Amino acid sequence: MPVFVRPTGPQGAEAMGIAPHNLLRSVGFSQDTTLAVAKLIFSGFFDRHPNLKLIALHGGGVLPYLVGRFEVGDRVEFDHLREMKSKHANDLCQVCYDSITHELAPLHRLIEVAGASQVMLGTDWLHHVHEADVAVSRLDALPAAQPEAVRCGNAARAFGP
């Protein structure tokens, strides 16, 4: 059974001044998801649990945009601080993501980094953003077989036997 990484307010949100400008959903949730998954990657968690199906909500936060920073870090940071055996890019491709990016460009980047087979429909329905129809129709702008895979095929594979 897949495990969802569902963000909440990040630790220290009050000290970061997130509340006065209502940045919890736009910045805080992305930060929380990003940090949670990055910690799993760099701790070697996926090396120890290679068959785990993990789904990072909200398009994986800002993980797709950090790939270059992770790669530079591989060259300049201390090896003993990174416990993973595989490269982080492999781990990012092992994680599944929902499609809640609210714009097409971040969705394209997510697919470029993780692969279309790792992205499944997300809508934020019953949350404060009631754009289920927009979330579904946005997928029509994806190339070839990707819309159908993201709408239902990838989820069927992830939740199937």
Image (spheres, rainbow, N blue to C red):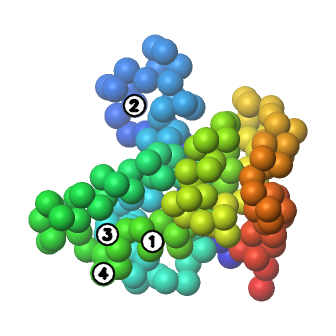
| Relative side of 68 to 146, left or right | left
Ranked by sequence position, the earlier of labels 2 and 4 is 2
Q: Are marks 4 and 3 in contact (CB under 8 Å)?
A: no
Q: CA distance from mark 2 to mark 3?
A: 24 Å
Q: Residue flagged by tag 1: what amino acid is it?
A: Asp
Residue at mark 3: 43
Q: Secondary structure at mark 2?
A: helix
- Counting from the top left corner in percent of width and height, residue 64 is at 48, 52
Can you tell which mark lies on residue 13?
2
Q: Which quadrant of the figure has residue 157?
A: bottom right
Residue at mark 4: 85
Q: Residue flagged by tag 4: what amino acid is it?
A: Lys
Can you tell which mark lies on residue 103?
none
Ranked by sequence position, the earlier of labels 3 and 1 is 3
Q: CA distance from mark 2 to mark 4?
A: 32 Å
Ranked by sequence position, the earlier of labels 4 and 3 is 3
Residue at mark 1: 91
Ranked by sequence position, the earlier of labels 4 and 1 is 4
- Residue at coordinates 43% horizontally, 23% vertically from top-left? 18
Q: Are marks 2 and 4 in contact (CB under 8 Å)?
A: no
The front one of 15 and 71 is 71
Q: Is residue 153 above or below residue 102?
A: below
Q: CA distance from mark 3 to mark 1?
A: 11 Å
Q: Is residue 27 above or below residue 74?
A: above
Q: Residue flagged by tag 3: what amino acid is it?
A: Ser
